[in-house]
Amino acid sequence: MTRRRTAALTAGLTATAGLALLGPGTPATADDTPGYSVRHITVDTLVGPNGDQPCAVTADLYTPDGASARHRKPAILTTHGFGGSKDDGNQTAIGQGFAQEGYVVLSYSGLGFGGSECKIRLDDPAWDGKAGSQVLDVLAGARSFTDEDTGAAGRVDYVARERKGDPKVGMIGGSYGGQIQYAVAMQDPRVDALIPIITWNDLEYSLAPNNADQVATGRSVDTRTPGVAKKQWVDLFFAGGIIDGVDDAQVDPGRNVGCPNFADEVCPTALKLNTLGYPDADMSAIAARSSVASYLSRINVSTLLVQGQKDTLFNLQEAVATFKGLRRQGTEARMVWQSWGHSGSTPAPGELDFDAPSLRDSYLGRRFLAWMDHHVRGDEDAPVGPRFAYFRDWVRYDTSPAAAGTAVEKAYAEKRRFRTPMSASLYLSGKDGLTPTADAVEAGSASYANAPGAPTSYSETSGLEGGQVNNPVSDAPGTFAAFTSAPLAKGASIVGSPRLTLHLDAPVAAQSQAGGPGGQLILFAKVYDLAPDGTPTLKNRLVSPVRVGDVTEPVRVELPGIVHRVRKGHRIQVVLAASDWAYADNALVQPVTVTTSKEEPSVLRLPLTGDLVF
């Protein structure tokens, strides 16, 4: 099976989620390119909890011209997204881009992918972290490699170092190649800087989120109540890994024994997740081993987090949780909310372009290079950038190829600190209203119920929306409640995660919830931007799935993080839907009534950068 067919079969993972997500890139066509040379190498590693499982790792070593034991160069260690390999266009572009700036780059295929041996371990530090650390040994000159073209052994002696065995090295990569950076840094204190792009904080939240009942740990997106399975993303995620194992069966036939290309416990766990619709203890344990939220206290490396606004797999909340956790423990961290992610992989003009002659020709390229120059090369004059920056898609700028790389800076707001305070409130009123005045709330209610059988609300086809699929959002009558504001008298900009407090009457759930997650109420909260003609926009197709632990108590929901301009004349609408096409469904028919009153207000709180005027 060719990789072209693999991409077609696993669409969202190999084409969008599996990372061509560092922007477009053209693969190298020759091993010798002006400014640097490339060697294809194999590194032998011993991994696993006991360090006794051999896994050969294939890699590309980019060496800038002039590098030698007397003229040492700083280094970059990088790997790819899920379903990819070192041969991906974006990986070769990273190698080329940093090599042209005088960095030694070691780009490798992760365990279970491309030409590397062993099974996928979901960026488990005991496996993937140890493998990455031993690949890093090559840059330290502490481990030899085998040249795949000649069979000769080799050793690197031209990487700059803090001391013998401790190279000056940073890591960069996206999605699966973002989380691996934490796993390596947890195992290896020699890493000097990280740039994790569009990756997760807590894999359980990523695959089965609950945006209510959150545990305020300051380092994760944990919830007290199990979440709601992202059935489509789960299917794509595991199908992508299995197919990659089939593609590369000749490398390590053992990858497909038992659970195909995954650790044996993963297959039954994934099946249970999508069958039950919520994570069980086995899923929680696997996710914890593979998530930085579980070991954040051991990450003491300067980190530039880059998260995508168009991302229904790893949303902005995940980066915020990691960012806040790092900051609270005193670890240097900065954060960028770029425009693109797993749900739309094309950067805005000038945002990131690996096909450009230099990393310096795009906004993110300059941020990446400056971060490494400062923390790895040791150039104290290289700017680390603002504490927080975010792309605004409503800001116009010159998008011509000649100007976009600089002009795009106009679309990026840059802040000295990360703050998204709830500066405006809209109160649910009567049966369908939203009012900015608490005293104007009318007592009332709106009722709905899920239909038995298939879901009746549509937000997206995960991994395909905006590319192969372009369906409008929809909600079937009787299966949702909606509360709508008056038209805005002037535009308003939302930056951050709105919050919603609800009061519900759900008699079936009140009885069935004692039986555990299967009997608990599921709902989907979302905010629509309604155009004057009534056309709804669901920003970046993002919804907040909620499994309610106790329907007799107020329900507090964190809505998806967005950067969005609601234009003058548009209305804001809160929608509570009984189901969603991309997620698990209620096990029972659950009638729900949303109540509104002055005494127990249901309210939407918005993080605005200005005023809300009607």
Image (cartoon, rainbow, N blue to C red):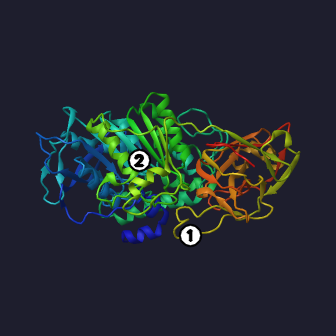
In depth, the one of 306 and 133 nearer the eye is 306
Name the amino acid type tagged 2: Gly
Percent from the top left, x then y, of residue 362?
A: 37, 54
Percent from the top left, x then y, of residue 383?
A: 36, 38
Which residue corresponds to mark 2?
A: 178
In depth, the one of 335 and 410 nearer the eye is 410
How many tags in the picture? 2
Q: Residue at x 39, y 60 (%)?
A: 256
Residue lying at the far right in this picture: please name it: 443
Q: Residue at x 81, y 56 (%)?
A: 448
Q: Which mark is residue 469?
A: 1
C-alpha span from label 2 to label 1? 27 Å
Percent from the top left, x then y, of residue 466?
A: 54, 66
Q: Secondary structure at mark 2?
A: helix
How many C-alpha atoms fall within 10 Å of the one at disc 1: few (<14), some, or many (≥20)? Answer: few
Q: Which of the two labelled residues, at mark 2 and mark 1, occupies the earlier sequence position?
A: 2
C-beta proximity under 8 Å, tags 2 and 1: no
Name the amino acid type tagged 1: Val
Q: Residue at x 35, y 36 (%)?
A: 187
Q: Which mark is residue 176?
A: none
Percent from the top left, x then y, of residue 417?
A: 51, 35
In depth, the one of 562 and 127 nearer the eye is 562
Q: Secondary structure at mark 1?
A: loop
How many C-alpha atoms fall within 10 Å of the one at disc 2: few (<14), some, or many (≥20)? Answer: many
Quadrant into which the N terminus falls:
bottom left
In depth, the one of 204 and 21 nearer the eye is 21
- Residue 293 is at least partly visible in this image: no
